[in-house]
């Protein structure tokens, strides 16, 4: 869902602020500052999704300077800009050493976790086609796998085979994964951890089943790999189960640097067991009158700015720095899990082993979506997650180093306890059963403009895409709709927000 509750700000020139000269640059920057004022903060640890703050002074300035130095460098052609190879090799090598790689490991720097996951699936599809002759490939996924893999299946023509997870641990049964593998399986995915609940899938068992079946196995460590890799260097993380390329049968792994590497957005690494496997995902074309094209990523032309910024931050923080940050997050995560369990009406789902927490209601009088609205009014953003695939409605918390101070943890728990009291007094959002029944009879593929308008109106979405200040009613309706209908309506909401003005 979109997060802003207001219509897009009007375009056009803005009046200069008091004491500000009306020059072009001043006006432009003033406009940007005014737009940013309507966003949630990206620093301080109170926005507990989407952003990652290490709380380290000077890091942003270093990253910005490095990005500026390489902003105009085109990563498309390393023969013209050989420095991009040096930087990428350094970053990939650092990731490989942290996450179980060896001298044969190969990798690619990508724009983010979604691109890394897309490339992992694309590579597996081509490998299955070339090596095993698979023409109708399948992708085996626990229902908790990230949506990026469903996007990859949609884009690259794979059939998804979903594996259920245990309703308490939210991890898949390795025996069920093994049973789902077949002659058409191109790739099986395990999460370390899964985004929704922060739990580690049984990677070793899933990878062993994949190896026995002759199938590739990808570990999605986008959100947890950098954090867990450094945490296990400490005594408190030494007991973590193996999840990386050191596990027999794991053939690829994705890890984002713009999450717990705390680099600017646009930085992820996709690691492969060896260069031969990686080559299946590359695109090359020489049968046209232009220059020979070879792409290791989905992008062609791409700024080397994010690459340079990521390299600079990794160099600045270093292994010991990341280990210390991981410990800070670990301690804050444990304190938050324990504190949440003490709040009447809340419970932590699963047994989160990483830095994520999913908080559900203990009884029907507490609506997590109403709690989210109350917390946002108190200056926090906790990400609502509608019920799906056996997981109840809950609130997602991403714990970063900036939230690790005792004062921040205590403030969050105190505000959360008060929010639960207010939510209980408010009562849960009720969706009209007649609306749910009527929605169930609709064919998402045949909705006309009038039906779309009516459905969005019932959900509280305005004709311009504006959302109400309190999101609980919208989320309750979304949760009650059949998934295919919700997926049909969500682009309509977004489309009303993004429009030419």
Image (spheres, helix red, strand yellow):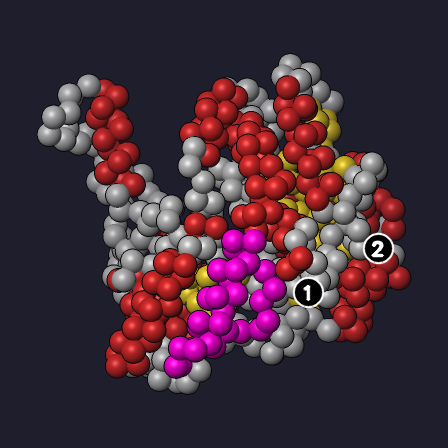
Q: Residue at x 69, y 61 (%)?
A: 240
Q: Is residue 126 visible?
A: no
| The N terminus sits in image quarter | bottom left
Number of callouts:
2
Q: Residue at x 86, y 58 (%)?
A: 211
Few, some or many residues within 10 Å of mark 2 (<14, 14–19, 20+):
some
> In the rendered view, would you say 263 is above or below 38?
above
Q: Give the structural element (helix, strand or loop) at label 1.
A: loop
Magenta part of the chain: 327-354
> In the rendered view, would you say 74 is above or below 400?
above
Percent x, y of residue 423: 30, 76
| The C terminus sits in image quarter | top left
- State the residue in front, 407 or 476: 407
The tag on residue 201 is 1
Residue 259 in magenta? no
- State the residue in front, 210 or 344: 344
Q: Residue farthest to the front?
A: 235
Using the rendered view, name the quadrant where residue 274 is placed.
top right
> In the rendered view, would you say 200 is above or below 3?
below
Q: Residue at x 36, y 80 (%)?
A: 366
Q: Which residue is mark 2?
A: 248
Q: Give the structural element (helix, strand or loop) at label 2.
A: loop
- State the residue in front, 295 or 386: 386
Query: 27 left or right of 459?
Result: left
Q: Residue farthest to the left?
A: 18
Residue 328 in magenta? yes
Few, some or many residues within 10 Å of mark 1 (<14, 14–19, 20+):
many
Mark toward the start of the polypeptide (1 vs 2): 1
Query: 48 left or right of 234?
Result: left
Using the rendered view, name the quadrant where residue 136 is placed.
bottom right
């Amino acid at each position: 869902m979109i997060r802003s509750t207001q219509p897009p700000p009007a375009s056009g020139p803005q009046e200069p602020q008091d004491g500000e000269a009306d020059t072009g640059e001043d006006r432009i920057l003033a406009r940007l500052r005014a737009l940013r004022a309507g966003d949630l903060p990206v620093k301080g640890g109170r926005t507990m999704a989407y952003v990652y703050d290490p709380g380290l002074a000077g890091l942003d300035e270093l990253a910005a300077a490095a990005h500026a130095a390489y902003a105009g460098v085109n990563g498309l052609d390393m023969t013209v800009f050989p420095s991009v190879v040096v930087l990428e090799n350094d970053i990939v090598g650092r990731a490989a050493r942290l996450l179980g790689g060896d001298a044969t490991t190969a990798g690619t720097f990508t724009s983010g976790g979604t691109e890394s996951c897309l490339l992992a699936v694309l590579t597996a599809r081509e490998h299955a086609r070339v090596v095993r002759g698979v023409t109708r490939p399948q992708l085996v996924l626990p229902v908790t796998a990230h949506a990026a893999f469903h996007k990859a299946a949609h884009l690259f023509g794979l059939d998804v085979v979903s594996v259920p997870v245990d309703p308490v641990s939210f991890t898949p049964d390795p025996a069920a994964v093994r049973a789902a593998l077949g002659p058409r399986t191109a790739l099986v995915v395990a999460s370390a951890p899964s985004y929704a609940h922060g739990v580690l899938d049984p990677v070793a068992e899933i990878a062993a089943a994949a190896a026995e079946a002759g199938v590739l196995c990808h570990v999605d460590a986008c959100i947890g790999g950098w954090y867990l890799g450094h945490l296990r260097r400490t005594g408190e993380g030494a007991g973590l189960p193996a999840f990386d390329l050191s596990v027999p049968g794991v053939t690829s792994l994705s890890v984002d640097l713009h999450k717990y590497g705390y680099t600017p957005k646009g930085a992820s690494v996709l690691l492969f067991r060896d260069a031969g496997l990686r080559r299946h995902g590359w695109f090359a074309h020489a049968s046209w009158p232009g220059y020979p094209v070879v792409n290791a990523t989905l992008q062609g032309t791409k700024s080397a700015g994010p690459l340079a910024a990521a390299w600079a931050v990794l160099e600045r923080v270093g292994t010991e720095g990341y280990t210390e940050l991981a410990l800070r997050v670990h301690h804050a995560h444990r304190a938050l899990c324990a504190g949440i369990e003490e709040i009447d009406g809340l419970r932590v789902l699963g047994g989160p082993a990483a830095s994520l927490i999913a908080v559900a209601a203990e009884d029907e009088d507490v609506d997590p979506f109403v709690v989210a609205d109350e917390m946002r009014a108190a200056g926090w953003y906790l990400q609502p997650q509608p019920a799906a695939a056996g997981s109840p409605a809950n609130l997602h918390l991403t714990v970063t180093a900036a939230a690790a101070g005792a004062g921040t943890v205590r403030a969050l728990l105190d505000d959360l306890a008060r929010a639960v009291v207010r939510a209980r007094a408010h009562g849960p959002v009720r969706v009209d059963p007649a609306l749910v029944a009527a929605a169930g009879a609709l064919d998402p593929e045949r909705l006309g403009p009038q039906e779309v308008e009516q459905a969005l109106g019932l959900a509280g979405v305005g004709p311009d895409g504006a959302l109400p200040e309190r999101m609980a009613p919208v989320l309750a309706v979304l949760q009650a709709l059949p998934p295919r209908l919700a997926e049909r309506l969500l682009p309509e909401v977004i489309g009303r927000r993004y429009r030419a003005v």
